[in-house]
Amino acid sequence: MSNLINSINIVNAGPTRFFSFKDPTRINLLIGGNGSGKTFLLKMLYSAIRTIETFHRGDDIRSITDILSDKLRWTLQTDRIGELVRRGVSEPLFFEFNLEDQHFSYSFSPSASVKIKNVELIKKGRAANSIFLPAKEVLSIFSVIKKSREIDLSFGFDDTYYDLVKALSFDPMRENNNSALLKSQKVLREIIKGKIDFDKNSMRWFYKDNNNCKYSIGVVSDGIKKISIFDRLLVNGYLNNNSIVFIDEIESSLQPNTICKFLDIVDDISEHMGVLFFITTHSQLTLKKLYLVAKKRKGTVTCISLNNNHSIDICDLYYGIPENGIIDIVADLYNNETEGEFEHEKLITEIAKNSY
């Protein structure tokens, strides 16, 4: 079990009626159909954690209420905070979690504008850095995201994109003796056969392969860019012990073999660096691979299945894969295929009979 987050309770948030989750494991997988609320829940949790990590950091003197209100509005891209409350209910949205040794909660009604009033005050911020990796890569639109947020101050790219852009801007550290990080970095570099870097003169990213050949980031596959982003966050020190990483649709743009290798790295980093992961997926391959990861030891991977009837099934993947929409679709396809083959065989048999 992870000791970073003890419990999460969310009520009337977006498509979610009620979400309660105790003792997250090192890797937590959210599955469910489109519109079931997977990404929404991730963004709600990310907004709260980043609020605490920003609170009283450096010279930032903003109140916890101001930080949270801004974070929710820019992460969920809404003119009014009240629009985040579940449609058709009069009760307020309620959020609470226990993060390490602090309890944090807030609530607001559908009529809330741009400021949250009912926020529990906390005593201190958090030194670690957490990050959200969206399904769409950011390197090729790096400058566009910065301009949209820093100059235009307009909606379009939410705070998960903007925070990632800022995190990637840190230069790689010259030395790091963390054995888990070095091991993961080696595997990542083997997957992408090179690394990415930032040219401060042209303000553009480029990819350099193992033969020292340099390429514009625009001609590099999305899969390489996605893995490279994770590599960069490790080597520049943004991700550290007790970071919390949110990955939306981890399989996006990745080949099956790469997905498996990437998940092995996630497992290794979570175990040896204490990094906590929340991951969403639509992929049967991702689900199966994490099941194999979970089989190594109990309490490693939790599967959270969001169902269309708004019920939530939570289980330790060590004990098996729960019933879910992903498996149902695969089963339906198999049944359709075998049924089609059976009908085809019947037709061939009838043709054979009639030919005599």
Image: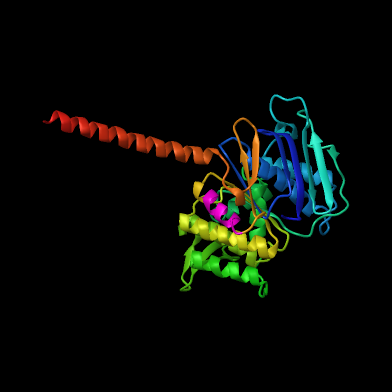
- Which one is in front, 352 or 21? 352
In the image, taking residue 216 as reference, residue 47 lies left or right, namely right
- Which one is in front, 318 or 151? 318
Does the magenta stretch mainly form a helix, a strand or a loop?
helix
47 in magenta: no
Q: Using the rendered view, name the quadrant where residue 332 is placed.
A: top left
Q: Kindly give the residue lying farthest to the left in the view shown.
A: 356
The residue that appears at 49% across and 58% down in the rendered structure is 258
In the image, taking residue 295 as reference, residue 122 lies left or right, namely right
The residue that appears at 59% across and 35% down in the rendered structure is 35
- Which one is in front, 333 or 131? 333
In the image, taking residue 302 as reference, residue 281 lies left or right, namely left
287 in magenta: yes
Q: Is residue 151 visible?
A: no
The residue that appears at 66% across and 60% down in the rendered structure is 270
Q: Is residue 122 visible?
A: yes
- Which one is in front, 232 or 44? 44
Q: In the rendered image of this protein, does residue 63 appear above or below residue 82?
A: below
Q: Position of residue 91 (x, y in %)?
A: 78, 27
Q: In the rendered image of this protein, does residue 129 appear above or below residue 45?
A: below
Question: Where, quadrant-wise, is the C terminus in this rendering?
Answer: top left
Question: In the rendered structure, which segment of residues is drawn in magenta?
Answer: 286-296
Q: Position of residue 267 (x, y in %)?
A: 61, 60
Q: Using the rendered view, name the quadrant where residue 299 is placed.
A: bottom right
Q: Position of residue 140 (x, y in %)?
A: 53, 55
